[in-house]
Amino acid sequence: MQQTQWQPKTAAIVVAGIAAVLLAIGAVTLVTDVPGQILVGTAAVGLLVFAVMSWIARPKLAIFQDTLRYRGWWQVRQLTRADINRIRITEFRRIGRTVRLLEIDTTDDRLLVLSRWDLGVEPLHVLDALTDAGFAPGAGSGGNR
């Protein structure tokens, strides 16, 4: 049975939260200059907000009955097969490694871009599952990769 929902890994979110707390402690106790405290404190708050919002927006993408659910930080979008123009993988090199993104192009001219962090697995696996579920237009043609 194939996976039907994808989300950031729990351990990764917890590590980000712990790192935020450690940064906050460091900003208060270790950094002695005010600009440094502001810089490290801002980084701690930003990382903590990112960890909390990543936790709230779980699962990020899910196949639910005949719809595809995309959960953002503020809302949940339900996409039917008719709402999807194209699903594809975008691949590029960054700092010596290949980065893949899953792009979902909708009929209302919105582009949903999901990374490995968002999905918790390689985007190619998600594309295969979406194609098998009939969400990728032209499924089986190989034109989505």
Image (tube, grey):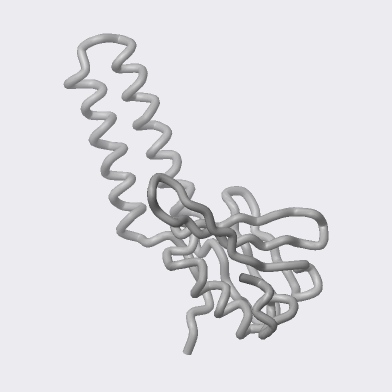
In terms of image quadrants, where is residue 108?
bottom right
Give the x, y percent position of residue 59.
Answer: 51, 64
**Residue extending furthest toward the left:** 30
Provide residue 122's location: percent of width, then percent of height.
Answer: 45, 67
Viewer-proximal residue among 14 and 83 = 83
Q: Residue at x 74, y 76 (%)?
A: 137
Residue drawn at x 43%, y 67% is 121
In percent of width and height, residue 111 lies at 70, 54
Residue at 68% x, 74% y: name it. Answer: 143
Residue 129: give x, y in percent of width and height. Answer: 56, 79
Above or below, 82 against 42 in this view is below
Image quarter where the C terminus lies is: bottom right
Is 50 displayed left or right of 77 in the figure? left
Q: Is residue 127 left or right of 20 when viewed as pictured?
A: right
Q: Viewer-proximal residue, 95 or 7?
A: 95
Q: Is residue 85 left or right of residue 123?
A: right
Residue at the location (72% across, 61% down)?
105
Task: Farthest residue to the bottom: give it.
Answer: 1
Q: How many numbered discs, if any?
A: 0
Q: Is residue 94 above or below residue 46?
A: below
Residue situated in front as seen by the camera: 42 or 74? 42
**65 on left or right of 92:** right
